[in-house]
Amino acid sequence: MLDIDGIVSIPEDELIEKFVRATGAGGQNVNKVSSAVELRFDIARSSALDEALRTRLLARRDRRVTAEGVLVIQAQRFRDQAKNRIDARERL
């Protein structure tokens, strides 16, 4: 369970993580290690959100929300996969 603000908590099974190769500088290791994280949260189908909050989130003009209502957060600030995973969840 990911606690957002003490009121909203998102079940782990509603979060989809995909580990991908980071872009940019990083030496030879950048081409071999999947350290970046892509975190997906389906706003449109989430059971953790009430209808008012869901409507507000989907109405926002945010390039991270797909046409299907899925929020996609990409985290690649760190060279470490675990740190990027934490970063993505904090940004959510």
Image: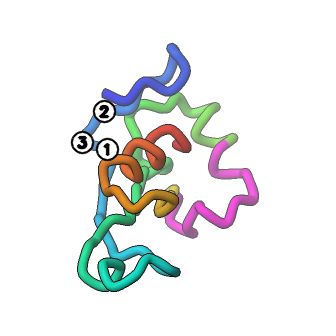
Q: Amino acid at mark 1?
A: Glu
Is residue 72 in sight in this rendering? no
- 16, 82: nearer the viewer: 82
Answer yes or no: do the residues labelled 2 and 1 have beta carbons within 8 Å? yes
Answer yes or no: do the residues labelled 3 and 2 have beta carbons within 8 Å? yes
- Tell me the quadrant of the picture where the N terminus can be found: top left
> Residue 32, relative to residue 36: is it above or below?
below
Q: Residues within 10 Å of mark 2 (few under 14, many from 20)?
A: few
The residue tagged 3 is 13
Question: Image point 55% across, 21% down: which residue?
Answer: 5
Horizontally, residue 6 falls left or right of residue 16, namely right
Instruction: Identify the element where label 3 is drawn.
Output: helix
> Residue 36, relative to residue 88: is it above or below?
below
Which percent across, then down, holds residue 32? 24, 81
Q: Which mark is residue 11?
A: 2
Which percent across, then down, holds residue 91? 55, 43
Answer yes or no: do the residues labelled 3 and 1 have beta carbons within 8 Å? yes
- CA–CA distance between discs 2 and 1? 6 Å
Question: Image point 50% across, 38% down: which residue?
Answer: 90
Is residue 89 in sight in this rendering? yes
Question: Image point 41% across, 47% down: which residue?
Answer: 45
Highlighted range, magenta: 57-70
- Does the magenta run of residues contain 62? yes
Instruction: Identify the element where label 1 is drawn.
Output: helix
Q: Residues within 10 Å of mark 3 (few under 14, many from 20)?
A: few
Q: Which mark is residue 14?
A: 1
> Residue 6, relative to residue 12: is it above or below?
above
Q: Amino acid at mark 3?
A: Asp
